[in-house]
Amino acid sequence: MSHLLVNQKVLNENYKETCQNMYDSLTRQNYKSYIFIPYNFGYHWILLILSVETGNLIVFDSMRNPKSAIQHILDPLNRVWKKFVKNNKGRGQWRPELNVNMDYQCARQQQGTDWCGYYVCDYLHIMTPCGKATDEDTRMSQMGDECYCTDWINAVCELAGFILNEILDPRGEFYHDGHIHRGLPSSS
């Protein structure tokens, strides 16, 4: 599900439309094993992974917030899930309510850092096997604290800052507006 269509801001501003967007996305992707939902609330990113086959919703939160902190997304997701199950009877053996699991091991964000977005991107990378034959347990086990080091994350943050400031910013030294600029034709 797109983080542009499902986040705390749009959920607060247009609850009904956001729920419909979630339902439409679930309906379009119901044949998949997992639906990834990168979710932003209060300047914090988490990753929700919906196992369509089992109705499990796995929450990866590097700050280990309590369930109550994300109840504002869990309630509409559960409402959408119930509607999906009701409207798709006979197409699968789905549980009537989502089973929310917040106990999966994932990297713990250090106090005072803003690495949650990095972690969500890394979780997505780990969970998409890119053609490699790995099972869910193997991928999940890679999400513990041991695979992150400060130097690695700082290097990635520095690279992201360079891309943002020097390539994407129109004032950056390496910015390109997408147009091909040709010199004037020669006068010879």
Image: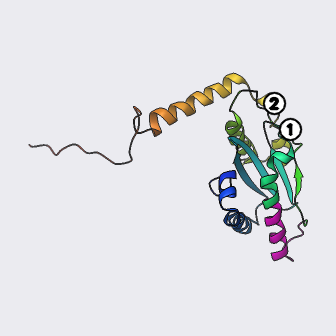
Residue drawn at x 83%, y 38% as measured from the top left: 64
**Mark 2 closeness class: few <14, some 14–19, many ≥20 residues within 10 Å:** few
Residue 83 coordinates in the image, percent (x, y): 81, 71
Q: From this viewpoint, which residue is outermost toward the left? A: 188
Dominant SS of magenta comes to: helix
* Badge 2 amino acid: Asp
Residue drawn at x 65%, y 56% as measured from the top left: 10
Q: Is label 2 in contact with label 1 (beta carbons under 8 Å)?
A: yes
Q: Is residue 149 left or right of residue 89?
A: left
**Within the image, what quadrant is residue 84 found in?**
bottom right
Q: Secondary structure at mark 2?
A: helix
Residue 172 coordinates in the image, percent (x, y): 41, 33
Image quadrant for the N terminus?
Answer: bottom right
Is residue 79 shown in magenta? yes
The one nearer the camera, 6 or 16, is: 16
Residue 9 higher or lower than 25, as above or below = above
* Residue 140 is at least partly visible in this image: yes
* Badge 1 amino acid: Gln
Image quadrant for the C terminus?
Answer: top left
Residue marked by disc 1: 105
Residue drawn at x 29%, y 45% as measured from the top left: 181
Q: Which residues are magenta?
A: 77-94
Residue marked by disc 2: 145
| Mark 2–mark 1 distance (CA, rounded to whole Å) | 8 Å
